[in-house]
Amino acid sequence: MQTLGCLPGEIRAGTRRGKEKGAFSPLPCTDATTHLESKQTGGITLKTLAFLAAMTAAVAALPAYAEERRITVGGTGTALTAPDMATITLGVTNQDAQASVAMQATSDAVTQILARLDEMGLESRDVQTRDLSLSPVWSGRNSSSNAPPKITGFTASNRVSVRVRDLDNLGQIMDAVIQDGANDFGGLSFGVQDPKPLESEARAKAVADATEKAQQLAQAAGITLGPVISINDHGGGIRPKTQMREMAMSDAGGVPVAGGEISVSVNIAMEFEIAD
């Protein structure tokens, strides 16, 4: 028998077994009432959780809709400047029947070149030797005879990389190292000692370029451009321009060179919110 309600003080008999066999103790009516209320409270809690879960899912979907209301554009900025630094790659190569003679001649020439660069005021941090090599010279490799190829001599070479920070002396330096025995010219490249100001200028131009594009798109679409959501810097690089200019030479003359212009480019991507 189950009682859902009772008067104050009423009890239910025969529903709780005592310690002794066959004995029953009265069960207060409030136990049944409390048990029923607990079930009801549990049901309300589940409904509330289900409602909150549905509301959370609906709110979570709102940002996805907002993300679609944006304009994404790319921008490019370029800054130009005259170079203030050059890097020369040169080398010394000698050949002789004896390996030691070829290597000694190469070493003597490189030593003289390094001494001359020091006399001309170049710092040790701007001069570096590299690619020292000694290789045999073969004869008979391309011959149609059956005679095996043989070594007829040796070639020794060494390279020197020189960074010149005063471009007014560049021609003189190149002329001096050639006179001291440099017979292998590996190339000449120009650059800037501190590219950060140039990169900042290029980056500002890239932002202006992207902003102008976004404004044009918004105007063409009949919408209002909102604030910036994000900016991504995709980097860039330093490269020489094809436009050349004559470099100033000293009265002593030297090898004629032209430095041209150095350009730094930066690419960015910007996202703007659509205001309406």
Image (tube, rainbow, N blue to C red):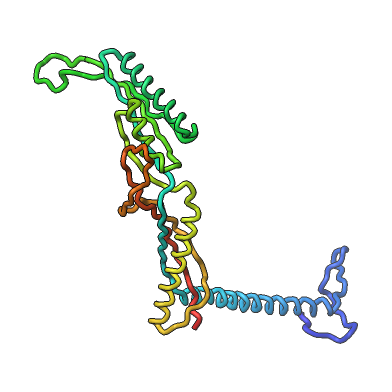
Q: How many marks?
A: 0
Image quarter where the N terminus lies is bottom right
Percent x, y of residue 255: 32, 38
- Residue 183 relative to residue 224: left or right: left
User: In the rendered view, would you say 20 is above or below 108?
Assistant: below
Percent x, y of residue 245: 33, 51
User: Which residue is at the far right?
Assistant: 9
Q: Residue at x 90, y 82 (%)?
A: 9
- Residue 201 relative to residue 108: left or right: right
User: Which residue is at the far bottom?
Assistant: 7
**Which quarter of the figure has residue 136?**
top left
**Which quarter of the figure has residue 202?**
bottom left
User: Which residue is at the far front?
Assistant: 251
Q: Name the residue nearer the viewer: 55 or 115.
A: 115
Percent x, y of residue 16: 83, 71
Q: Name the residue nearer the viewer: 177 or 8.
A: 177
User: In the rendered view, would you say 67 is above or below 167?
Assistant: below
User: In the rendered view, would you say 100 is above or below 180?
Assistant: above
Q: Residue at x 48, y 64 (%)?
A: 204
User: In the rendered view, would you say 176 is above or below 243?
Assistant: above
Q: Residue at x 45, y 65 (%)?
A: 205
User: Which residue is at the far left?
Assistant: 144
Percent x, y of residue 150: 20, 14
